[in-house]
Amino acid sequence: MQNDCTLGDLRCGTGLRFASGNKKIFVLHSELARALGVRCTAAGLNEADSKQALWVAGLYAAGDVVNDLHQLSVAEGHAALGATAIHSSLPRDLR
């Protein structure tokens, strides 16, 4: 079921319109990851370890490609884990 909603009024007197309902708006594209040898789940999500590293050396992933929660805060957390892992892997003189 699709609902059209108006969110608030803007200064010019118009509202913001958006569609809501059960329509799937996220489309996962993991073809490049698969081509690079990344292991993916049956749903197409990239399989990452606890530091967001993929099973191909030097590749990391964050957000909707590894988790289907579709939340910005989840992607930011993944990015922080991956960035920390990358930083820690650098030689001391490059940190």
Image (cartoon, grey):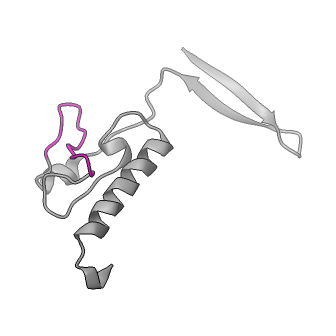
- Residue 60 appears in which quarter of the rendering? bottom left
Q: What's the magenta bit mostly, secondary-structure-wise?
A: loop
In the rendered image, residue 6 lying in the magenta stretch gets the answer no
Q: Residue at x 17, y 31 (%)?
A: 42
Q: Position of residue 8 (x, y in %)?
A: 80, 34
Q: Is residue 26 left or right of residue 16?
A: left
Q: Residue at x 19, y 52 (%)?
A: 54
Q: Residue furthest front?
A: 92
Q: Nearer the viewer, residue 39 or 82?
A: 82
Give the residues drawn in magenta, as a range. 39-51
Q: Is residue 78 left or right of residue 89?
A: right
- Residue 40 appears in which quarter of the rendering? top left
**85 in relation to 39, above or below:** below
Q: Residue furthest bottom?
A: 93
Q: Position of residue 91 (x, y in %)?
A: 22, 79
Q: Position of residue 20 (x, y in %)?
A: 58, 25
| Quadrant (top left, top right, bottom left, bottom right) of the C terminus | bottom left
| Quadrant (top left, top right, bottom left, bottom right) of the N terminus | top right
Q: Nearer the viewer, residue 90 or 66?
A: 90
